[in-house]
Amino acid sequence: MMQFIHKYGSPKHFYEWSGRWAKILTWATLVLMAAGLYQGLIVSPPDYQQSETVRIMYIHVPSAWLSMFTYMVMATSGIVALVWRIKVAEIVVGQCAIIGASFTVLALVTGMLWGKPMWGAYWVWDARLTSELVLLFLYVGVIAIYSAYEDPRTGAKAASILAIVGVVNIPIIHYSVEWWNTLHQGPTVTKFDSPSAPASMLIPLFIMFFAFKTYFFAILFARSRNELLMRERESSWVQQITKELK
Amino acid sequence: MKQFLLMDGYAFFVWGSYAMVAAVLLLNVIAIKIQRRNILKQLRELSEED
């Protein structure tokens, strides 16, 4: 485990392997997005209750899932950053916060655009919506702390602590539809024994989910590489890269 | 085709959602491109000072 972290977490090594993966993941995202949009917008049928608005699900649900997944990646990275002081992990915390905030905004906005025609209101202070909004505030907090210090390493450490404490919100979001009476519908997909959506809807949903996931890692790697170059500008491997670019 | 665009009267909500997602996902990509250009420029300037 330690060897793994040190090997793949060394700045130079990370820069190299993440560059290769960023390319592969970008292509995977493009292919999956195209397939997912085709399945979701053209092949899948309208819902018998929700008509065409059900198509919002194919982007709303992946956004919401990724908003939570990104948070877990950020918090895990925060632990690695605090315990082993790995520089790459510190950078990942800051980059996850920005990508996670984007996903959270998308989950909220697409949810509002789905809520208006189906519930009659853009927003209700219901447990699921409120806890997702808290998630957005957590991301904004992490971003603010991360960039508030003169020394980026101090900022990253402080931001990691908030990220780790905020994990408590994730199960609240997940179980909010079961613990409280909410307007938001309960889980339709994660009941694997009896999913309450037909295959024609689950297929585009899962394709879009993987598209969002590959997108997340592609963006995470690309952003982290940029930040890493800047932070390591004094080191010989970055100067070597600069020389090659000339 | 027209029916596809109308989305059974929910065009604003369905296409609005897709447009928002496309805009935010693309903004993230553009931000990286700009960031990368600026960083490489700074690195070049740094190495010329030496």
Image (tube, coloured by chain):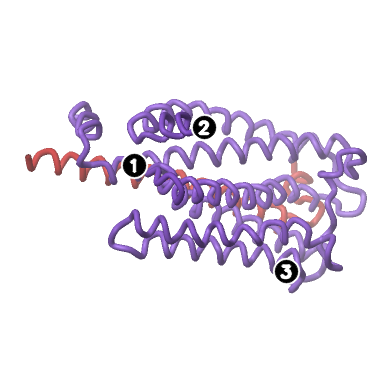
Chain colours: A purple, B red
Same chain for mark 2 and mark 1? The answer is: yes
Single out the residue that lies furthest toward the left. B50
- Residue B6 place in picture, x, y as percent: 76, 51
Question: Which type of secondary structure does the marked residue at label 3 adopt?
Answer: loop
* Label 2 neighbour load within 10 Å: few <14, some 14-19, many 20+: few
Is A233 on the left or on the right of A103, as rendered?
Answer: left
Q: Say whether disc 2 or disc 1 marks the residue closer to the N-terminus.
A: 2
Q: Which is nearer the eye, A140 or A12? A: A12
Of the two numbered discs 3 and 2 in the rendering, the one whose residue sits closer to the viewer: 2
Question: Which type of secondary structure does the marked residue at label 1 adopt?
Answer: helix
- Residue B23 place in picture, x, y as percent: 54, 51
Q: Amino acid at mark 1?
A: Leu
Q: Are marks 2 and 1 in contact (CB under 8 Å)?
A: no
Residue at the disc numbered 3:
A122
Q: Are marks 3 and 1 in contact (CB under 8 Å)?
A: no
* Inter-mark Cα distance, 3 to 2: 47 Å
* Inter-mark Cα distance, 3 to 1: 40 Å
Of the two numbered discs 3 and 1 in the rendering, the one whose residue sits closer to the viewer: 1
Of the two numbered discs 2 and 1 in the rendering, the one whose residue sits closer to the viewer: 2
Position of A5 relative to A77 (above/below): above
- Residue A86 place in picture, x, y as percent: 40, 43
In the drawing, what numbered circle is on residue A1? Answer: 2
Residue at the disc numbered 1:
A228
Is A106 on the left or on the right of A52, as rendered?
Answer: left
